Amino acid sequence: RDLSAPKESSRQTCSPVCLNTGTLLLLNTEWTRQLLRTWWQAADEEFPNFRHGKDHEESVLAKLFSTDVLQMRSKTLVLRATDLNSVPPFHKDHDSKQAVMHLSDTPDAVRSTVLRRLAALLQRSGDGVMHLDIESIAGNSTQPPLLERITSDAYRAVWANGTSDARVPMVLAAEERDAGAVNTAIVLLDKAHHLSPIDPDGALAYASLLASSADTSELRAERWCEAAKVFLRASRQLPSSQQT
């Protein structure tokens, strides 16, 4: 096909499917060039918030695909989410057979740290070509995968050095929650919520953990009230078009 793209795993709001643009394969054809021109023009003309970061290229591509502009559906091969892409979070359950490891939605400071660590693991084969033994970083049943440990260390280092990126404490909170350290996770989510108070994902994660931990906490009433306040604060600060 002229365009090959993996489906989006974390967003299901498009019809008939959301496409992920982390990695695309485009055939060098006149149709592909016309699609790129149409894609760019649609971003300017139909998505006024595109240049301000409120819409993004996937929003535009999804609209073109849903309306079958340029007979796009017949020209596009929709791949599985793990073909040419990683399912977020990229460092969890990464299959060594995946052709692409995509560090999507990863803060730049974390991304550069992870890539430096992986670069240090490159090995030179007999023909002089540098390669990375993916099997060695995919882990085994006796310990967490090396990729997961490298990434966790990178998030913790970035957090320790100070960051205003709310994604960092959110990732660390998920790790603490999974390890059973609920109170530590709540503290981290509180910091993430203050860094980005109108982020719906952060507000939902924070309020949900507060509410779910209330039944076993001596601070039951206080946590339920705080969970309610988090939802209300987030909803008041969202644009009216996003409030539900």
Image (spheres, rainbow, N blue to C red):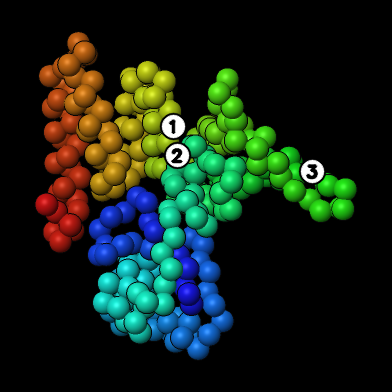
Q: Residue at x 35, y 42 (%)?
A: 195
The amino acid type of the residue labelled 2 equals Val
Q: Where residue 80 appears, x then y in whole percent?
A: 43, 55
The amino acid marked with disc number 1 is Leu
Badge number at residue 172: 1
- List the residue tagged with mark 2: 168
Instruction: State left or right for residue 173 relative to residue 96.
Output: left
Q: Residue at x 14, y 33 (%)?
A: 228
* Dot 1 crowding, Cα within 10 Å, few <14, some 14–19, many 20+: some
Q: CA distance from mark 2 to mark 3?
A: 30 Å
Left or right of 103: which side holds 51?
A: left
Residue drawn at x 65%, y 41% as measured from the top left = 134
The local secondary structure at tag 3 comes to: strand
Few, some or many C-alpha atoms within 10 Å of disc 3 (few <14, some 14-19, many ≥20)?
few
N-terminal label among 3 and 1: 3
User: Which is more foreground, mark 3 or mark 1?
Assistant: 3
Q: Residue at (48%, 77%) from the top-left corner?
A: 2
Q: Position of residue 205 (x, y in %)?
A: 28, 36
Residue where numbered disc 3 is placed = 123
